[in-house]
Amino acid sequence: MQINRIILAPMEGVLDYHVREILTEINKFDYCVTEFVRVTNHKLSNRTFFRLCPELHNDGKTISGTPVRIQLLGQSPEWIAENAVKAIELGSYGVDINFGCPAKTVVGNHGGAYLLQYPNQIYNIVNQVRTAIGSNPVLSVKIRLGWEDKSRCYEIAKAIENAGANEIVIHGRTKIDGYKADKIDWSTIGKIKQKLTIPVIANGEIFSIEDAYNCIKHSQTNDIMLGRGILNIPNLANKIRYKHSSLIWQEVIKILLSYAMTAIDDVKPLYHSARIKQWLAYLKQHYPEASVLLPEIRQLKSQIEICDFLKTKLNN
Ligand SMILES: Cc1cc2nc3c(=O)[nH]c(=O)nc-3n(C[C@H](O)[C@H](O)[C@H](O)COP(=O)(O)O)c2cc1C
């Protein structure tokens, strides 16, 4: 089987605009999805949309030209629809709706994965968004296989297709599976795909070329979405697509440095220091050097210190 599309996953608190910029520069992705923005009972401001997706200033694309899709999360069909229209008007490359988030605050507010228990409500939201945005813009929906079990996965997927979505991203675990590696179930994605006519994008637990091929074999789709794996190996998409080797550690340091340098202009200096440490924690999964670097970087407070330190590591 051939890989067709590779999509960069949304990851709230991790995969921000700067990281998207870096990863789409290094890899060929078909499109990216933003971190989710929560919709309650009002229209979000322009400022909120531009902060979430600064690419809207660039025709909805990263500097390297990869389209970016805004992801909405909420439970009110009316307000998700209103905000979907706004996202499209501002130049988002279609709109994505999140029915997979397992976070306590999100499910506590009856959003994200909570709605997997209520396929009718999912239908209402997707249908109302489709009606509001019209037939042209791409509408994608991201789900897990279910809440406690997978018994309603076909009903959920069919509701999404019948409501007018163009494509569906399926993270092959239930809400209660969390991120447990042994719970990944690409085969059920394949069974769902057989019942649908819209494209299915398989997601979950792809950390290597081998995983990618196992995933497309079992899920019987050629389209995949990469999440944590691309943070562990920053050129994973190109490894999968073009059989490239993993970036060498010196190249990874350059990436971290460019992230740290971009961040210097930002208003919240500690935010990016924390994010560099967080990214190193992912990199540790593939690069033993990251385990050595992380405790050293943890001692440093400011971004300037982190930049200076990373520069010393460049030619070591
Ligand atoms: C820290 C973190 C944040 C995430 N944020 C989002 C999000 O904003 N929207 C979403 O649909 N999924 C989100 N996800 C789920 C991922 O997009 C993806 O479905 C999940 O990590 C499984 O893929 P992976 O095994 O390749 O990481 C998040 C996952 C993680 C670990």
Image (cartoon, grey):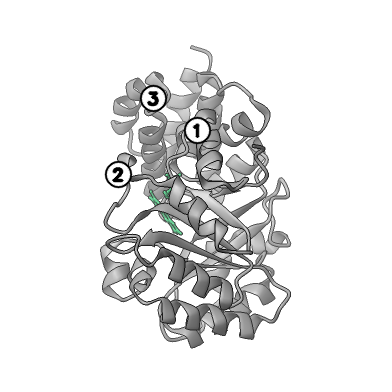
Query: Marks 1 and 3, how far apart in space?
Result: 11 Å
Q: Which amino acid does label 2 sit on?
A: Lys
Q: Which mark is nearer the camera, 1 or 3?
A: 3
Can the viewer see residue 19? Answer: yes
Left or right of residue 238, residue 280 in this image: left
Q: Position of residue 56 (x, y in %)?
A: 66, 64
Q: Quadrant of the image for the N terminus?
A: top right
Q: Where is residue 217 in the image (x, y as percent from the top left)?
A: 55, 39
- Residue tagged by mark 3? 290
CB-based contact (under 8 Å), mark 2 and mark 3: no
Q: What residue type is labelled 3?
A: Ala
The earlier-in-sequence mark between 2 and 3 is 2
- Residue tagged by mark 2? 180
State whether label 1 is within 8 Å of ligand 1. no
Label at residue 256: 1
Query: Marks 1 and 2, how far apart in space?
Result: 28 Å
Numbered marks: total: 3
Q: Return the residue nearer the eye: 95 or 56.
A: 95
Q: Residues within 10 Å of mark 1 (few under 14, many from 20)?
A: many
The earlier-in-sequence mark between 1 and 3 is 1
Q: Which residue is drawn at 57% across and 76% down?
A: 162
Q: Return the residue nearer the eye: 28 or 185.
A: 185
The earlier-in-sequence mark between 1 and 2 is 2
Q: Which residue is drawn at 56% across and 78% down?
A: 163
Q: Which residue lies furthest to the top in this view?
A: 316
